[in-house]
Image (spheres, rainbow, N blue to C red):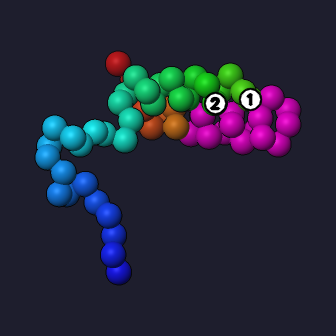
Amino acid sequence: MDTDTDADLPAADRHPLLTLDEARQAVELLLHFEDDTEEGRAAGQLGADLARRLPSD
């Protein structure tokens, strides 16, 4: 099995998947799209689930 990783990249080229600020912005956007549609409820649920996992400072 051939898998691509960033293990061979120099440390300067590696980036975290999301910064804390980006994660908070993503949660804010998900919660913004929450409404009574199926997609809106899913966005709200995902936003709420992710918000609980973020550090509160």
Whether residue 39 is situated above or below residue 30 in the rendered picture: below
Residue type marked 2: Leu
**Residue 41 horizontal side relative to residue 55, left or right:** right
Residue 18 horizontal/vertical position (percent): 38, 35
The magenta-colored residue range is 35-49
Residue drawn at the location 58% of the way across and 23% of the way down: 28
Percent x, y of residue 17: 37, 41
Q: Residues within 10 Å of mark 2 (few under 14, many from 20)?
A: many
User: Is 39 colored magenta in this rendering?
Assistant: yes
Tell me the crowding category of disc 1: few under 14, some 14 to 19, or many 20 or more residues within 10 angstroms, Cα based.
Answer: some
Q: Amino acid at mark 1?
A: Glu
> To which quarter of the image does residue 23 belong?
top left
The residues tagged by marks 1 and 2 sit, at their Cα atoms, a distance apart of 7 Å
State yes or no: discs 1 and 2 in contact (Cβ < 8 Å). Answer: yes
Q: Name the secondary structure under disc 2.
A: helix
Q: Secondary structure at mark 1?
A: loop
> Residue at label 2?
30
Residue 45: x and y in percent read 67, 39
Please say if 47 is above or below 38: above
Residue 43, quarter of the rendered image: top right
- The residue nearer to you, when weighing 12 against 37, is 12
Q: Is residue 42 magenta?
A: yes
Kindly identify which residue carries mark 1.
Answer: 34
Decide whether the magenta segment is chiefly helix, strand or loop: helix
Q: Position of residue 4 (x, y in %)?
A: 32, 64
Residue that protrudes farthest toward the right in the picture? 37
